[in-house]
Image (cartoon, grey):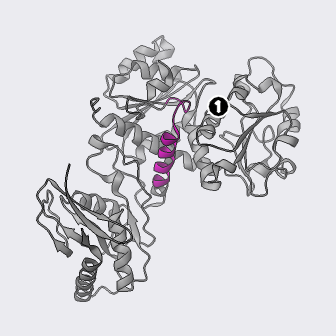
């Protein structure tokens, strides 16, 4: 069973959120519209909704993360769920416990949702395959495979600034090879009908799947950034570079780093995005990262609403009794 | 099918009298999505109220999330005024079990502490499951549980009564 078949039930309802790949435009639009309704919660006196009152969400992080874990935690808390944070790097797995044993033990604590981050591609799928049917699994990043909630929050941020998707031109720049963010975002943009997705990267950081997803490949930002509406800079993932794929960071910045001069090639109202954490002076110049066109911090804020939307939709679908086939 | 404009006229008269009796000069009107917002828009116009209209979508406050999940058509709630110490008029199209009003009150109080809340509804069909009553009622109908009543609109606004399939 593929991840897509695993996350959607016979009626087409989302039961887990493992990957954007294979979902329909209706699925994505429902998530984006629901997130739009949840955005205002942060501006109220009481930044909390009673929707997931009495539910328990477990953040299972086998890999370090600050932003993703905290925004998932905040999302769950703003929906009134109880949250348990498990940083597995510092717990029982280092004592030799298997992934399945960890899962069974946490399951025995009567939880409703697992949010999983793991260095291994497919870890969240594995969880979804083995959890009890009442438990929902959300993928918070698995290896170089997918980071679907990040892809959705990027799509949400783009839609808020540039709602006309058919005429949209998006450039994704940098370390595509190690980027689960890029893959999830390209899938989301394709499903939502974005006009054109461009990928700008050196050959050594360009995986084979890019062109099969219909992205236009450029090796030079000078050509690739021309007239785009959105620039998504990716983090150079130094920790994933097992062998030297690049000469030096300075050279990468010279060739691909987003500077004010390069930003001027894009449309005058183009926005600049980055999933974070940013390497200043490696993939992006500070003047651009902190400049008026940057929506990088807005992405963080939007991430909370998008994760709230996904959590409430998925747990809501678990709540509903499955209708018998007519 | 019943014309709702006449009922809104009735509501406007009742609400006007009630506001005078309570000494409320500038209330804030809040409609519950979707039918309640249509009624609230018209009442605000008739009563010449300057405060912008509030809109509540109570989807995230419903008490049956564990049965039906999230409404995929949820819209943003917006209260474009400070709720603290305001006299609020909550407006809905149909009052039935009282559960929507319970949810709307809970949501309202997450924005602030109003001075008072009045409830105005276009139609009260009976069948209450919670201790909730309206201060202003356009029409009272005795409908058996099998019948459905729905406000269709926004132009024209009409009350549709039909037997559930």
On screen, A40 above or below A168?
Answer: below
Direction from residue A302 to residue A202 in the image, left or right: right
Q: Residues within 10 Å of mark 1 (few under 14, many from 20)?
A: many
The residue carrying mark 1 is A183
* Chain ID of residue with mark 1: A
Query: Does A261 lie within the magenta span?
Result: no
* One can see residue A316 in this view: yes
> Residue visible at 48% across and 40% down?
A27
Image: magenta residue range: A18-38
In the rendered image, residue A15, in percent from the top left (x then y), is placed at 40, 32
In the rendered image, residue B109, in percent from the top left (x then y), is placed at 33, 63
Query: Does A34 lie within the magenta span?
Result: yes
Direction from residue B71 to residue A161 in the image, left or right: right
Direction from residue A44 to residue A224 in the image, left or right: right
In the rendered image, residue A207, in percent from the top left (x then y), is placed at 73, 23
On screen, B39 above or below A39?
Answer: below
Secondary structure of the residue carrying tag 1 is: helix
> Residue visible at 69% across and 26% down?
A212
Viewer-proximal residue among A44 and A166: A166
Q: Farthest residue toward the top? A: A96
Viewer-proximal residue among A131 and B13: B13
* Numbered marks: total: 1
Viewer-proximal residue among A2 and B105: A2
- Is most of the magenta stretch helix, strand or loop? helix
């Amino acid at each position: 069973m593929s991840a897509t078949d695993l996350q959607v039930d016979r009626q087409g309802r989302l039961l887990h959120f493992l990957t954007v790949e294979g979902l329909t435009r209706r699925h994505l639009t429902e998530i984006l519209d629901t997130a739009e309704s949840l955005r205002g919660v942060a501006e109220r006196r009481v930044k909390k909704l009673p929707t997931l009152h009495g539910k328990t969400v477990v953040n299972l992080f086998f890999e370090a993360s600050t932003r993703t874990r905290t925004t998932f935690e905040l999302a769950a808390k703003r929906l009134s769920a109880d949250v348990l944070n498990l940083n597995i790097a510092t717990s029982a797995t280092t004592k030799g416990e298997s992934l399945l044993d960890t899962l069974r033990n946490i399951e025995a604590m009567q939880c409703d949702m697992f949010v999983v981050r793991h260095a291994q591609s497919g870890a969240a799928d594995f969880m979804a395959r083995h959890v009890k049917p009442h438990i929902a699994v959300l993928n918070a990043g698995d290896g170089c495979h997918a980071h679907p909630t990040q892809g959705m929050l990027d799509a949400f941020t783009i839609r808020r600034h540039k709602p006309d998707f058919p005429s949209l031109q998006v450039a994704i720049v940098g370390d595509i090879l190690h980027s689960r963010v890029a893959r999830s975002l390209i899938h989301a943009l394709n499903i939502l009908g974005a006009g054109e997705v461009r990928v700008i990267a050196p050959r050594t950081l360009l995986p084979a799947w890019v062109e099969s997803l219909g992205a236009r490949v450029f090796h030079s930002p000078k050509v690739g950034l021309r007239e785009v509406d959105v620039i998504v800079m990716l983090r150079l993932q130094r920790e994933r570079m097992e062998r030297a794929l690049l000469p030096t960071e300075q050279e990468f910045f010279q060739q691909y780093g987003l500077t004010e001069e390069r930003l001027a090639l894009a449309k005058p109202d183009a926005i600049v995005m980055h999933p974070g954490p940013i390497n200043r002076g490696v993939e992006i110049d500070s003047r651009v990262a902190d400049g008026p066109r940057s929506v990088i911090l807005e992405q963080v804020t939007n991430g909370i609403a998008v994760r709230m939307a996904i959590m409430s939709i998925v747990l809501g679908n678990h709540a509903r009794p499955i209708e018998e086939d007519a | 099918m019943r014309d709702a404009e006449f009922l809104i006229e009735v509501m406007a008269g009742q609400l006007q009298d009630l506001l005078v009796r309570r000494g409320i000069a500038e209330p804030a009107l809040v409609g519950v999505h979707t039918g309640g917002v249509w009624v609230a828009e018209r009442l605000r116009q008739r009563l010449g109220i300057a405060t912008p209209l509030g809109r509540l979508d109570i989807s995230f406050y419903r008490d049956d999330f564990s049965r039906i999940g999230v409404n995929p058509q949820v819209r943003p709630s917006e209260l474009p005024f400070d709720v603290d110490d305001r006299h609020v008029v909550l407006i809905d199209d149909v009052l039935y079990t009282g559960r929507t009003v319970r949810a709307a009150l809970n949501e309202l109080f997450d924005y602030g502490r109003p001075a008072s809340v009045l409830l105005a509804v276009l139609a009260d069909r009976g069948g209450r499951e919670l201790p909730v009553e309206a201060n202003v009622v356009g029409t009272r109908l005795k409908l058996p549980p099998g019948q459905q009543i729905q406000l269709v609109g926004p132009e024209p606004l009409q009350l549709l009564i039909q037997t559930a399939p």
